[in-house]
Image (cartoon, helix red, strand yellow):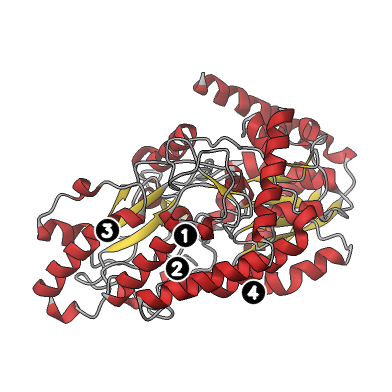
Amino acid sequence: MKKLLAVVLALILSLAMVSFATAESELPYCEFDWYIGSTPPTDLQIVNDALNEYILPILNCKVNITYMSSADWVEKMGTMIASGDDIGIIGFGSQSKSDYVIESQRGAYYPLTDLFATYAPGTYALFDEAVWEGMKINGEIYGIPSLKDNGYFISCIYNADMIEEMGIEITDYQHSNFRELEELFYEVKEWRDATYPEMAEYPIAWANNLIYPYNFAFETFLNDSYLAVANIDGIMDLAGYDTETIVNFYNTDEFLEFCLQKQRMVADGIYLYDETDRSDMRKPANGICFFTGWGYTNMQEHLHSEEWTSKMMMADVIWTETNNYFSAGTAISANCKNPERALMFLELVNTDPFVATMMRFGVENIHWAKTEDGDMTFDFEGSRNADVGNRGYYYWYNAPVGNLTIVNAPKSLVGEDNIMMTNMMKYNEECIVPAHLGFVFDTTPVVNEVAACTSIVLEYQEDLVNGRCESPEEVEAVVAEFREKLAANGAEEIVDEVQRQIDAWKAAK
């Protein structure tokens, strides 16, 4: 059935492409912008020109691509959206730094619900109806999620040479999250420091500074702050709560225990106090052994360094939740003068391997070329991507762009027979699905409380989860102060409002 569906979708795309091309003379010429949240590449204009050369005969339009760093996005995009100007296609999510729910509720994006059937049927077919229901804000779909690792595929990436030399069996330490790997980390650090004392000042594990999803799995209804969360059946990371009870994670025993664990492990040299400007520490063969991994379904041989072999151990649970689909995607500006044409273009982005590949690796025979056996290489005469430290255009995954699963990529990244993409779709299907997939929290009734508490989270969370307190006593004091401030600024009102909305959402289903 899957193969048949793939053939049918390919046929639909082919017919749609023919239809677009046939209708080209009927389509008035237009241009629109596309803003992508990532570091601007050196060869953007080369790629932009090549892309326009490809799409012009199909859609009779051109797109003007702008890459914006996170800092620039935060500084400029809000003002650009508020100006009411036509800013074309806009990325959203963690890289683009625009919150899908908030911007949709503000009226920043163009409603797409009624346009998919005519202008982007192939894109709509990429996701189940439950996902599209989850993308609806006040009854309308305003954005297209990127088809990629749409579940939390968390792995522990490790120095396989060090583990082999030490002589332990890594699978004996199977885990659900990084909190459960403390014993392994201490054991390996003790062995490494005794065997290679010159490395004793190195941590044994690289940064692990995200509460979610490296250390906890739950439904979260406010993106990067965990003021209102719910347990997921089959995981149940928070003791004493069922899957229907909304809880302020920062008030749980588990949050305090996690903060104490991080302080202890930083004090003992398991983790660094601060990784800023320390990336070279990842390279030595007998230095750092463990790294966090998110989204990997295939591990390249030398991910962090040519001096040691990379392997990974997947967590024994994978799950998804609504916010996963808000984490990377594309929307169309509410004031776009040509929303239908912009959506037709996004149909190509999400269904045409040529476009999807160009947006990751650049232009064939300029940035990449095919080897005799059909593999992709960046190392050829005249290549503008040969110098790893100074590539002209190279974005892997480039999650804000769209469908990753149709990208043609080198075996070094995706493995033999494209095993990475095969595993990715397999894991997507196997994800544990929480009870409230599709629920979107409307912050309007508690918008002031959310703003105040989010500011407090930003004030306290980073230092606590990075283990930067001097002692366990200081951790307990800071957490107590953190909780008091949240309570004084309406944290319980937020929990109550999420609970009320979820109960109403369930009753209406």
Query: How many numbered callouts?
Result: 4
Q: Is residue 267 visible?
A: yes
Closer to viewer: mark 2 or mark 4: 2
Q: Viewer-proximal residue, 217 or 137?
A: 217
Q: CA distance from mark 3 to mark 1?
A: 20 Å
Earlier-in-chain disc, 2 versus 3: 3
- Residue for point 46% across, 48% down: 217
Circles 2 and 1: CB distance less than 8 Å? yes
Q: Residue under circle 2?
A: 465
Q: Secondary structure at mark 1?
A: helix
Q: CA distance from mark 2 to mark 4?
A: 23 Å
What's the amino acid at mark 2?
A: Val
- From the viewer's perspective, tell me whether residue 430 is left or right of residue 334: left
What's the amino acid at mark 1?
A: Ile
Q: Secondary structure at mark 2?
A: helix
What's the amino acid at mark 3?
A: Tyr
Residue 229: x, y in percent?
57, 49
Q: CA distance from mark 4 to mark 1?
A: 23 Å
Disc ID at residue 71? 4
Q: CA distance from mark 2 to mark 3?
A: 22 Å
Closer to viewer: mark 4 or mark 1: 1
Earlier-in-chain disc, 2 versus 1: 1
Closer to viewer: mark 2 or mark 3: 2
Earlier-in-chain disc, 3 versus 1: 3
Q: Secondary structure at mark 4?
A: helix
What's the amino acid at mark 4?
A: Ala
Disc ID at residue 158? 3
- Residue for point 30% across, 67% down: 205
Q: Secondary structure at mark 3?
A: strand
